[in-house]
Image: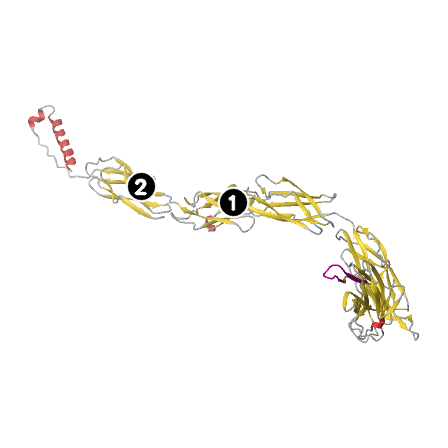
Amino acid sequence: MLVSAFTFAPASGETGFSVNASGFYNHYSFASYNGTATYTLNMENTGDSDINDVVITSEFPHTSWLPDNVTFSDGSSEEIGFFAIETFAAGTTQQLTASVTVGYGVQLDYPEVPVVFNADSGSSTIGSTDVVVVVTNWIAYESNYPDTPDAEVFSVGENNTYQLTVDNIAVVKNSDNTTSPMAIRDSIQVQYSGISGWSVTSDDESWHPFYGGQLAGMDAGASITWDVKVELTGTVKAGPDVINFQASSTDPDDPMGGMPYYQPYGLSVIPVSAAEAYGVDVSGSGMRHADVSEGSSLQDWQVGIHNIGNTEDTFALTWDVTNVPMGWTLSALPDTSGEIGWEGAYNFDVALTIPADALAGSSASFTMVADSSNSDESATQTFEAVVDQHYGVSLAVDSTSMEASPGSTVDFNFALSNAGNGEDTFGISIDGAAYWSPVTSVSNLTVSAVSDGQFLASVTIPEDRNAGAESGDIVVTVSSSNGETTANVTISAVASQVFDISMDHSSGSDGKVTIIQGTTKQVFMNVTNTGNGFDNLTLELIDKPSWAFLDADYLLLGPDGNFRVVITLEPGTAALSGKEYIFNLKATSQDGESVWSSPYITAEIEVKETEVPEVVEEVVEDEDDSPGFGILASLLAFTFVVLNRRKD
């Protein structure tokens, strides 16, 4: 194998010289102490002229490495320390073998020792090349080396078997300057430098499942080979790759405490190739819950199209939106992922706008199918959104205060509005003075979304309440089924005034009275307010004689109040004796509508006793004899009495 080399090229361009070297592996060759590392030197005169007196020498980093430890050979002759070429003809090439012996006493700072091969002509260096001597007791390689096994193409789950070999190259110097193989105590490990997706196993008992091949020393000249199985176990990028093994060792006899030695990479490699495989995965789907209590809701998904194959692929994206309701708006939907590389992804957002008037429980779903353009591989995602129920309630009443008479019931008509977006069952409660018996017509009411429901709240005015008595605050509360949303209205009831008056004769009286002309007499009528409030009564005698008078025209009575109304009778002589005068008392309540009548009063007039003048009869003789004269005298006497009575 060739490596880079120094090339001599004069400015004239008429002459030129190049030299390069190759070892066992690239510019590396391997030898133990007392062993020999061999290199091939390739030289070429690329100029137009011959080059004379070309000398090939070696150069080491430390003087303990002697030039005489290097032997050069062109196949027909062999020289120690240097190799001379008298004439290097123009346009010709020449090959030498350089053998570097690792003397037992050389200074060794590191196992890898750099060596320079120089080509000189006269006093000028016309070319040079660098190599490395690797001082080691062993060498590990894939068994086909220097060839390489064919790069098998693997699909996941497939495997092939290969061989790894370790040779003991350690030698001991004999007394006759020859060398012989020697046993070594090195602890050698050949471990798989793992790459994801591949596995290496072996049934050999000296192969550890994690640490690989394990050797505790080797016999002289021994060679150990492991059969290893390489399998593709996961997804790796399609195309060629290399399974590499790191060979290392420690020497228990090393005075430095067994510092590890690592063989240069490249000898123990296995070329492989992964077959193309296609696959797709999609992400980002899921259920979204939309809250439209504050208005329309925007729900979004971060969608990913993932290439889970092992090579580039493009995926067609097909959408099914038939289950998205009218009025629900989707953002733009891509129809292709574009080309996605291995382990790559195409990411984008999808948004769904849900209108503010969407009802609770309404939903949408849509699907996306990603299809590989190179295979039948596909993947599907479903995206869903559902509207959550939000709650709201308002309460109104036809009147917040009502008035009724004691003992009666007033009904308040309530309108309950469901301001939420779903059917809701509202609990209804009423809180107020129990004596007023507040109650609602129902304890709960189910109302559809954005709809109204009605119910009654009833309050009974206690029978013993006076006019104007109030129930106090009665609170009607409605509560949504979520246990948090409520509304309430305060109502009250007032006892209205009931006008009721009773009248009866004073105790012991039946309402009949006899009065003598020209005298004064009082009769009494008991007036009682049997209503529930103060009443300002207007009093009036009905069908009364002119000589009957009330002592007052107005009377103010409180509840259960009683007053004895005085009626004064003062019949004059004009009042007919023997006649009964029948009349009664009328009381009109302050409402002007409630009128009450008392029992009748019957007043009988007696004639007042008066002194009648004595009539002296004079006997007139003449008259006695006149016919009719006695009758006339009697009539004259009657008229007087009447006149006297009338006068009285």
On the question of residue 248 being in view, the answer is no
Q: Is residue 623 left or right of residue 513?
A: left
Residue at the image position 6 percent from the left and 26 percent from the top = 622
- Left/right placement of residue 227 relative to residue 3 reads right
Question: Who is closer to the viewer here, 562 or 224?
Answer: 224
Relative to 230, 431 lies left or right: left
Q: Are marks 2 and 1 in contact (CB under 8 Å)?
A: no
Q: Nearer the viewer, residue 360 or 619?
A: 360
| Most distant residue in the top direction | 627
* Tag of residue 79: none
Image coordinates of residue 23 in percent, x first then y, are 83, 63
Image-quadrant location for residue 169: bottom right
Question: Residue beneath label 2, please?
Answer: 587
* Front disc: 2 or 1: 1
Residue 280 drawn above or below residue 40 = above
Counting residues from the N terminus, which is met first, the one under dot 2 or under dot 1? 1
Within 10 angstroms of label 2, few (less than 14), some, or many (20 or more) residues?
Answer: many
Q: Position of residue 86 (x, y in %)?
A: 84, 65
What amino acid is at disc 1?
Ala
- Quadrant in which the N terminus appears: bottom right
**Residue 460 vs residue 240, the one in the foreground:** 240
555 is higher (above) or lower (below) than 5:
above
User: Which segment did they paint magenta?
Assistant: 7-21
The verdict on residue 224 being magenta is: no
Badge number at residue 419:
1
Q: Give the quarter of the image for residue 204.
A: bottom right
Quadrant in which the C terminus appears: top left
Q: Residue at x 92, y 72 (%)?
A: 178
Label 2 and label 1: CA atoms lie apart by 56 Å
Image spot of residue 343 (x, y percent): 71, 52
